[in-house]
């Protein structure tokens, strides 16, 4: 039995998918399992690959247990190193926002002269999270503006290379802006001394 690849009758390129004398690719195994222990076929019979046999193999179970223990060990190392540099609990504070806070903060950014009280509120010597205090610092709005800038910049020419180039360029500009703000805010202190 020969099937054409869709080129039409006038084209000479044909692809034979199967011939009548070729053996089947897979044995018929839907009739049930063998009576051999642990689901293996009887000796001398053709064995078809079955996924269930893979999980009954003791070597596979040992390899899976070993792989999961290595993965959990590496995960613990990564978490320990991450907590060494950045505390996730401290980082969660800057992303503790809700929709009402974001709307009010965007209104404050657009109309800053309407706001009177600029002090950060504290509770038990710790600043209140952003959803309770409009003046609390947050990282949600800067992160969303960074991502929006990147996506709008590469809108018509999307590719992984352009995305990486745009992200690194935007990150360099953000770092330069922060350094300029730090230099501008600490320059009077150095000029006095």
Image (cartoon, helix red, strand yellow):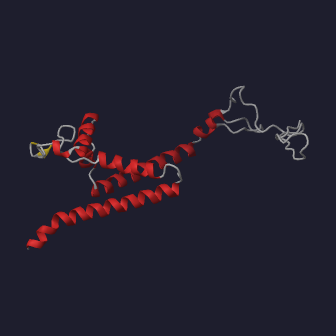
From the viewer's perspective, is residue 20 above or below residue 148? Answer: above
Counting from the top left corner in percent of width and height, residue 96 is at 25, 41
Relative side of 94 to 152, left or right: left
Give the total number of marks visible in the rendering.
0
Quadrant of res 18: top right
| Residue closest to the far top | 31
- x 28%, y 57%: residue: 84
Which of the pair 151/121 is nearer the observer?
151
Which of the pair 132/37 is nearer the observer?
132
Quadrant of res 186: bottom left
Q: Name the quarter where the C terminus is drawn.
A: bottom left
Counting from the top left corner in percent of width and height, residue 54 is at 61, 40
Relative side of 175 to 121, left or right: right
Counting from the top left corner in percent of width and height, residue 43 is at 74, 38
- x 46%, y 46%: residue: 68
Which of the pair 18/34 is nearer the observer?
18
From the viewer's perspective, is residue 191 above or below residue 119? Answer: below
Q: Name the quarter where the N terminus is drawn.
A: top right
- x 88%, y 38%: residue: 2
Counting from the top left corner in percent of width and height, residue 128 is at 16, 42
């Amino acid at each position: 039995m020969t099937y054409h690849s869709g080129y039409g009758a006038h084209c000479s390129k044909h692809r034979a998918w199967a011939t009548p004398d070729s053996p089947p690719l897979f044995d018929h195994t839907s009739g049930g399992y063998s009576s051999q222990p642990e689901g293996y076929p009887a000796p001398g019979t053709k064995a078809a690959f079955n996924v269930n046999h893979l999980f009954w193999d003791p070597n596979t179970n040992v390899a899976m247990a070993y792989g999961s223990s290595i993965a959990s060990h590496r995960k613990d190392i990564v978490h320990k190193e991450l907590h060494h540099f950045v505390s996730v609990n401290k980082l969660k504070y800057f992303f503790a926002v809700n929709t009402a806070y974001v709307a009010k903060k965007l209104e404050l950014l657009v109309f800053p002269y309407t706001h009177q009280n600029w002090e950060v509120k504290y509770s038990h010597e710790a600043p209140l999270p952003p959803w309770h205090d409009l003046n609390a610092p947050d990282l949600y709005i800067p992160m969303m503006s960074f991502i929006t800038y990147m996506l709008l910049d590469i809108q018509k020419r999307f590719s992984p290379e352009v995305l990486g180039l745009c992200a690194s360029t935007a990150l360099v500009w953000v770092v330069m802006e922060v350094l300029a703000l730090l230099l501008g805010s600490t320059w009077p202190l150095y000029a006095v001394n």
